[in-house]
Amino acid sequence: MISYGAYVSNLHHFQPLFKRWERRVPLTDEDRSAWAELPWGRKTVARDAYLTREGEPTKVCTLLLQGLAFRQKLVSDGARQIISFHIPGEFLDIQNSMLEVADHNVQALSRCTLGVIPKDVLVQVMDARPNIRRAIWLDSLIDSSVFREWVVNVGRRDARERIAHLLCELTSRLKSSGVSDGALYDFPFTQEQIADATGLTAVHTNRTLQALRKEGLIKLSHSQLTILDWEALAAIGDFSERYLHHSV
Amino acid sequence: MISYGAYVSNLHHFQPLFKRWERRVPLTDEDRSAWAELPWGRKTVARDAYLTREGEPTKVCTLLLQGLAFRQKLVSDGARQIISFHIPGEFLDIQNSMLEVADHNVQALSRCTLGVIPKDVLVQVMDARPNIRRAIWLDSLIDSSVFREWVVNVGRRDARERIAHLLCELTSRLKSSGVSDGALYDFPFTQEQIADATGLTAVHTNRTLQALRKEGLIKLSHSQLTILDWEALAAIGDFSERYLHHSV
DNA sequence: CGTTAATTTGAGACCATTCAATTTCGGTGG
DNA sequence: CCACCGAAATTGAATGGTCTCAAATTAACG
């Protein structure tokens, strides 16, 4: 029998997830408790830890509960391309539920707490609960939309535009999720990570960030970011929230 | 009452789709006939026609029956980034089933025949038929994987590598789908389209293709492509089929 | 407070772009 | 069947954004 304390505690971990899901799909109390009662494993990992490795067979799906994480692929000469960043309440590898082999790597960006669940359990709950199925299906479609925008970002924007766009995306998503109030204090990304996410070198990322600072668009030091002029930054980055599908 | 002739004819149109689906998910005769009996609209469009426009409300989903198509986004200065190419038997906008507004454009690359279906019909059939649901869910996850690889391609490879990779992807997908035998005769892509897909200019794409030709890696003229040295081209493009998930 | 990671700076080289101009290709009408 | 036309491919030369390779400085952390 599950104690009331543990039960509430479980539900508590899923608040960012439920909050995000319920913006788009109605959940019943049954949905929520069924979700919380799944055989979740808890895991805490250090910064830079690999959560998934390309080429390995998929066994579980991973929900990010606390901290930040990112997906990446390595090319033959060893260069790294970051493909997406993830915030609490997001699945890091929902595709593992259906695909047999991981096609990219997932790494912790900061110290992370994770909810880990066997892939077949997830498939079962998706079959049984239409609301949860739709919520996950929507998450996955929105992930896809973000990947598409990243193709555009690295393919057709220059350094200044790419970085402005990335900062806008992170701010917008954190604000929408309620994790941050929008000014994005606490910005644990290294310049090398920003470089790998934008297809630039760390050196050029450094110079570009300095330019944005000198123009009074952002304030960034000691892992603290402040967006000083959102309108200007969004204009530079050609940023529109549409692709994030915050409302449905 | 649906005539036998029309019924068979309908099924015929979906052969490339069913063939692809059944590599990963078992379909029953009931699944197939239920699918064929949906209220499909047929549409034929000319080269370059827009099938979906960013910002427009989503009403239908579109299945490519014949011809080639691509997804793209335009940035503020008018530049175009192509995000994916599509071959017969693939959905062009499955995300329309759940999202309210299109986040990118879809264009016909050649003259196309399309199957068009209202989004709510698709949602219903996915709720009712687990096999079809899983097939579409898999399609969508693999689309996502391709988008991720494209982020890597434009983000961390040089011109030569990007184009080699793109040619390998197209060849591999056409071969796997059975549309082509793998040598990829009939290559209707313009150099401008290849440029827009790889984040390059048409001029540099031209020079890079010439280099690949001079090295004896490909033969390309008059819209006919032949891969002369697959191994070498795949090595240059750092190409692995893993991300295409041909088998599950 | 020492050690490593992360950021910053400089200078030169290079890949890809820009901007034209030219040639070839593909389709059309006379 | 050939002349014509716009689209696509090709070529050249100059420019420039980003990279490379160090080296120096600053920040983070136990």
Image (cartoon, coloured by chain):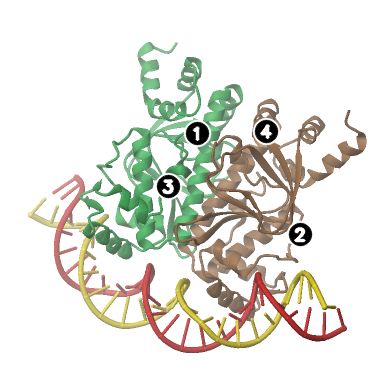
Chain colours: A green, B brown, C yellow, D red
Q: As drawn, is A218 to the left or to the right of B12?
A: left
> From mark 3 to mark 2, how far is it between C-alphas?
39 Å
Q: Which residue is mark 4?
A: B122
Inspect the image, locate mark 4, and give the three-letter code of the amino acid beneath it. Leu
The crowding category of the residue bearing disc 2, from other C-alpha atoms within 10 Å (few below 14, some 14 to 19, many at least 20), is some
Q: Upstream in the sequence, badge 2 or badge 4?
A: 4
The crowding category of the residue bearing disc 3, from other C-alpha atoms within 10 Å (few below 14, some 14 to 19, many at least 20), is few
Chain of the residue displaying label 2: B
Q: Which residue is mark 2?
A: B180
Chain of the residue displaying label 4: B
Inspect the image, locate mark 2, and give the three-letter code of the amino acid beneath it. Ser
Q: Are marks 3 and 4 on the same chain?
A: no
The crowding category of the residue bearing disc 4, from other C-alpha atoms within 10 Å (few below 14, some 14 to 19, many at least 20), is many
Q: Residue at x 70, y 56 (%)?
A: B68
Q: Residue at x 39, y 57 (%)?
A: A162
**B68 or B152, nearer to the observer:** B68
Q: Secondary structure at mark 1?
A: loop
Q: Where is the C terminus of chain B found, in terms of image quarters?
A: top right
Q: Where is the N terminus of chain B found, in terms of image quarters?
A: top right
Q: Which residue is mark 3?
A: A240
Which mark lies nearer to you, 2 or 4?
Answer: 4
Q: Position of residue B60 (x, y in %)?
A: 65, 38
Q: Are dots 2 and 1 in contact, CB under 8 Å?
A: no
Q: Position of residue B185 (x, y in %)?
A: 75, 66
